[in-house]
Amino acid sequence: MTILCVVKICLIFEHNGNCVSWVPSNSLMSTDINNYDWHKEFVEMKQFIISQLNLDNKYILLRNIQNKDITIDNEQHLKQICEDILLNQDSLTIFQIAIEPITNRLKNEEDEQKQSNTQYIISSSWTTTYSFDTFRASSKLLKTLIGHTSEVTSIDYSIFDDSQFICSASSDKTVRVWDIDNNQQIQLFNEHLDYVNGIKFSLYHYYIHRRNVTCFSSSDSTIRFWDIKHNQQLQILNGHTKVVHGIALSPFNSGRYLCSGSDDKTIRLWDIETSKLLHVFNGHEDIIRCVDISSLQSNNNNNNNKSNNIGVIGGNGYTICSGSADKTIQIWDIETTKALIIFKGHDDYVLSVKYGSNELGNIGCSNTTLSGSFDKSVRLWDIRSGQQIQAFIGHTDVVWAVEYLPFVVDNKEVGETSSVICSGSWDNTIQFWDIRSNKNELYVIKANMKENQGITCLKFVPLKKKENDNGVNLFYGSTNGPIHRWG
């Protein structure tokens, strides 16, 4: 008969002479080590320490007093420490750690780094505008990134440690990460058994844990988080009962919150830190293809509330926008989960929605939402009045992607500059429009029909280095798999 010894693990944390002990929520055996929910334990442990020792600062370093090279900075560190304790087979093992708040100097450096990265990381927060005429006159196809073998469904961009990256999702069931400084694929995740539909770089993991992580939605009804450097899965969000399409991260609280839209006709709001489902939004009558989360709307003057907790952000102007196969776009209050506005005007599925940037509010973007549809149109909506502002008609096939751009153009009708928007379509074109005019498009990029057979997603990227006079490159995905770089 084999007897399994259950080892009690106790970690003692000390700070300024005060001590608190922590034990895992369940007893551990050596056979459990790889199946244990270490992310949950790490989060609960950290929250417990901060609460018990009355620490205001969540940026803490957990360091072994005896061996200062050993720290607990993430769930993998915690797992390794507990595994070492289990191997000793002691009935009670104490691992003593000192809590050292990160210095103000380091926090200030992090804040400065966040500010310098803002225009690169958060697409809704462009703070610099560029001349559209310059882009139109000099831009060309720069590079084609080959890897995906089927439709590219989503592209995102970020900057880590002074290097620029895009990530891409595809119906070939893979996620790929590309270093755009040298146009090379650097990582591949191919463990999905179904289509990957939406992808984002997780700002929260980078800001809080300094880890390079992507999150992506799938037709298997899950949302997964993947550590790029270590090529391992970190978290899974389970809750949707059908295909998950679009996902969006909060432009507040360091990207801690994620919303998702699904074929189960719900929108769900998640806390990335705890992996918990916070809210379910019901109201659409058909599948939900796309979502976005607002920054504070400009008609709310209380701008000091950008770091508030999720329980009160709804009252401060934070909302979710969703587009559905029921042909409507709905604006939801995050706190009450109620629909505030329902936009009606599209004649078919709504496939893409985006919030306008308040940072560019002086040129027509503030308090607006942009949408693209199966009805081949692009439409601009006023959130304050609940009315359609413009309809942009020019595509000859389904519009899969829409974006607000950091470009400005002279609008002679109003006597001042206007912002520029763009749209990508199955008609194999990307069309650019003056946000204040629904006349003919400003410019059209025509993709190679043999290589693409339709534009499925696009992402504009600000250049870290002044590689050309445009300041911006465009990456767009296609039905056949290639990703093209234009600039």
Image (cartoon, rainbow, N blue to C red):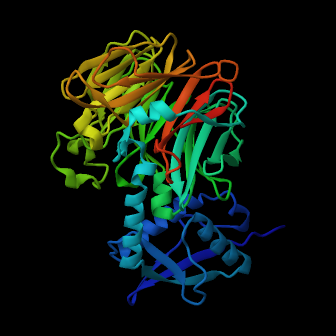
Q: Where is residue 227 in the image (x, y as percent from the top left)?
A: 61, 54
Occupied quadrant, residue 375: top left
Residue 443 screen position, x and y as percent: 45, 22
- The image shows residue 289 at horizontal and vertical percentages of 48, 25
Work out whether 439 lies above or below 94.
above
State which quarter of the image contains the N terminus: bottom right
Q: Is residue 290 above or below residue 438?
A: below
* Residue at 48 percent of width and 68 percent of height: 45
Q: Is residue 263 above or below residue 52?
A: above
| Residue nearest the observer in this picture, 254 or 371 | 371
What residue is shown at x 70% (from left), y 31% (from top)? Answer: 172
Q: Report the side of 305 relative to 201 (left or right).
A: left
Nearest the eye: 105 or 22: 105
Which image quarter: residue 404? Answer: top left
Left or right of 199? Residue 126 is left
Q: Residue at x 46, y 41 (%)?
A: 470
The percent coordinates of residue 21 (x first, y second) are 47, 79
Q: Can residue 201 be seen in this view?
A: no
